[in-house]
Image (cartoon, grey):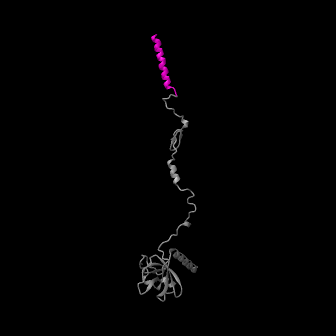
Amino acid sequence: MDVRFIRHIASLLAVGVLAGCAAPGSGDVASVPPASSYHQTANTVSTPSARSDAPLAFDSKLNSLPSQDADKGQSLANAEPITSGPDIGNFEQKGKASWYGRLFHGRKTASGEKFNMNAMTAAHRTLPLASWVRVTNESNHKTVVVKINDRGPYVGNRVIDLSYAAASALGMRGVGTQKVKIEGLTQQEARAAREQSQSLADDNVN
């Protein structure tokens, strides 16, 4: 066989083999999906064959927020009343009351407040400071609401020492001592009584 012919046949076979390896659809080359089949979001990239079903990170945070309807029906009207000081609504006592005035005016009381003879206050031996009581003069049935801000009295069998203003309101300024009834008040009762007293005082001024 002619040597040139053999070389020609070998060259053709080599070209054919190289062309077959480069042809698309070969089993040794991975198939790549077209660009249009990709789906991109802010956080993930997925293909038709591999798509993540996990929720996005910010989705879980949004789901944890309360709904807009969660606070409907809530208002300050449903809030607990703001109070200060102890409640002594179950306290009751009878005994003699005395009063003190000008000699102690401006002095420091057991509560740290300065004694004001013209304020509705009183001294008691055991009741909590900043508590409120209603005092009734049993001889004329006049009543007054006072704040306990001091300790005393420590003379004889007296149970409460009233300020000059409280004693005047009870009509006992001239007698010095008087038999009274003491009733403890809750903070709500004390506030209502003070508001009523203020309203009566405003009416008297007008």
Mark count: 0
The answer to whether residue 180 of the structure is visible from this angle is: yes
The answer to whether residue 100 of the structure is visible from this angle is: no
Q: Nearer the viewer, residue 103 or 68?
A: 68
Please state the horizontal and vertical placement of residue 133, each as a whole percent of the image.
49, 79
At x 55% / y 66%, what residue is drawn?
78
Quadrant location, the C terminus: bottom right
Furthest-bottom residue in this view: 175
At x 51% / y 76%, what residue is drawn?
190
Please state the horizontal and vertical placement of residue 54, each as a whole percent of the image.
51, 46
At x 48% / y 15%, what residue is drawn?
9
Q: Which residues are magenta?
A: 1-24
- Left or right relative to 100: residue 39: right
Please state the horizontal and vertical placement of residue 126, each as a whole percent of the image.
43, 79
Q: Main secondary structure of the magenta part?
A: helix
Please state the horizontal and vertical placement of residue 185, each as a whole percent of the image.
50, 77
- Left or right relative to 150: residue 189: right
Furthest-top residue in this view: 2
Is residue 155 found inside the magenta-colored segment of the image? no
Q: Is residue 50 depicted above or below 172 in this figure?
A: above
